Image (cartoon, helix red, strand yellow):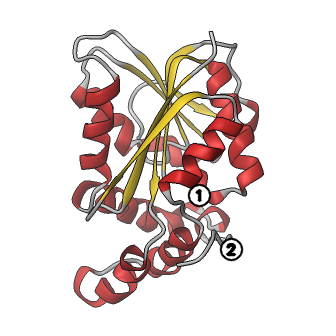
Amino acid sequence: MGGRVLKPEILDTLPAEQARPNLIDLARINRRWGGLSTLRKLIAENIPEHEDASVLDVGAASGDMGAEIRALRPRARVTSLDYIEWHLETCPGPRVAGDAFVLPFRPKSFDYVFNSLFLHHFTDRQVVDLLAGFGAVARRGVLTIDLLRHPVPYYFISKTQWLLGWHPVSVYDGAISVEAAFKSSELVALARQAGLREPRARTYVPAFRIAMSAGVSL
């Protein structure tokens, strides 16, 4: 596949009753096709097992990734943030409806700022602005999981809809998301532009995910 291509997605334009099945699909994809396995590796490499860490989960949606962080690190305090308030209705713990571009927190409010399948919704310039904002709110690091731009995930949902029963919105938005996704070198370059320190990215296949960690300025 060529460079990033951004197109409007359907999910954020839908009323709650129509969008909930797509959020269920997203959680199922994370659970069975690489999201949670990638998260486990990212957390193992960056948050010590017995650390009493605070984590801001940006673009948390249903909160499935934040719940897994709590399971992996029971002492972690996870706050879920999403622009759409009803997305957070199933999230345990503190929940904040807010704008990721103008985070409603003081500088260095959390040890880590985490996001999953979030950055690919935005242009490169917007990604730089978001990562810079995450770095301003984090005391220790910024942790990111996103899609790898690759033909396999591009076709996966549409080709398996007959078998796995994906919601039509998941089929449509899934392909668009992969078109807008990253290569690991691209994500690292954007993190450097944002002023994050020593960004490091790993690509996981067959999960077709990129996991990136970066330090922040003191």
CA separation, marks 2 and 1? Answer: 11 Å
Q: Nearer the viewer, residue 5 or 187?
A: 187
Between 13 and 210, which is closer to the camera in this rendering?
A: 210
Q: Residue at x 68, y 70 (%)?
A: 6
Q: Which residue is mark 2?
A: 7
Q: How many labels were placed on the picture? A: 2
Crowd tier of the residue under label 2, counting other residues whose Cα lies within 10 Å: few below 14, some 14–19, many 20 or above: few
What amino acid does circle 2 point to?
A: Lys
Residue 100 in view in this figure: no
The correct choice, above or below, for 88 with respect to 141 in the image is below
| Callout 2–callout 1 Cβ contact below 8 Å | no
Q: Look at 70% across and 35% down and name the residue there.
A: 194
Q: Position of residue 118 (x, y in %)?
A: 55, 51
Tell me what residue is drawn at x 29 percent, y 29 percent: 45
Residue at 45% over, 67% down? 22
Q: Which numbered dot is residue 120?
A: 1
Q: Is residue 97 visible?
A: yes
Q: Residue 110 at x, y = what percent?
A: 53, 16
Q: Is residue 19 left or right of residue 126?
A: left
The amino acid beneath tag 1 is His
- Near mark 1 (Cα within 10 A), the count class, few <14, some 14-19 or many ≥20, is many
Q: Position of residue 73 (x, y in %)?
A: 26, 22
- Quadrant for the C terminus in the image: top right
Q: Is residue 78 above or below residue 22?
A: above
User: Would you place residue 62 above or below residue 25 in this image?
Assistant: above
Circle 1: element type: helix
